[in-house]
Amino acid sequence: MSGAAGKTIKAMISAKEAMLISFGMGFVYSLVFLYLMSAFAEPIAWLCVALIQIGLLGAAVGSFFASVELKKKGKEHGNSAAQTKTFNEES
């Protein structure tokens, strides 16, 4: 085992303890996650729904204000709303 594969295997053997601890902790974290999801799945789901709704509402409000600003720039330069987008991209 003197080639590249041998060096890799030797490195894995020397790191055996760290790998086993990592696998064990991963298993423990999985069990904790499953327990928490079974206990709090419904509130977490409703929290996600609420956050998505807030994000969509924020995007709508932001789009509205961007549209108002775009139309305002167009009126300042005597352009229609359709031409304003092109003007805004050129600025």
Image (cartoon, rainbow, N blue to C red):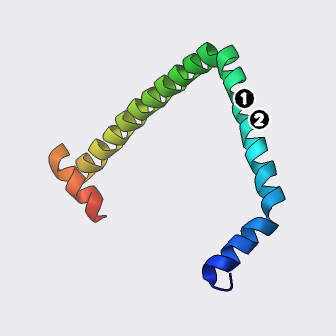
**Residue that carries the numbered disc 1 in the rendered image:** 31
Seen from the viewer's position, the closer of residues 59 and 76 is: 59
Circles 1 and 2, Cβ within 8 Å, touching? The answer is yes
Q: Position of residue 10 (x, y in %)?
A: 74, 73
Residue located 28% across and 60% down the image:
89
Tell me if residue 3 comes above or below residue 20 in the rendering: below
Residue located 23% across and 52% down the image:
85
Amino acid at circle 1: Leu
The tag on residue 4 is none
Say whether residue 48 is left or right of residue 12: left
> In the picture, residue 27 is in which quadrant?
top right
Res. 80 visible in picture: no
Q: Is disc 2 surrounded by few (<14), some (14 to 19) or many (20+) residues within 10 Å? A: few
Seen from the viewer's position, the closer of residues 20 and 33 is: 20
Amino acid at circle 2: Val
Seen from the viewer's position, the closer of residues 90 and 26 is: 26
> In the picture, residue 43 is in which quadrant?
top right
Residue located 73% across and 67% down the image:
12
Q: Is disc 1 surrounded by few (<14), some (14 to 19) or many (20+) residues within 10 Å? A: few
Res. 33 visible in picture: yes
Q: Position of residue 64 (x, y in %)?
A: 35, 34
Say whether residue 78 is left or right of residue 89: left
Q: Quarter of the image containing the N terminus?
A: bottom right
Question: Which residue ends up furthest to the front in the rendered image?
Answer: 1
Q: Quarter of the image containing the C terminus?
A: bottom left
**Residue that carries the numbered disc 2 in the rendered image:** 28
Q: Position of residue 63 (x, y in %)?
A: 36, 37
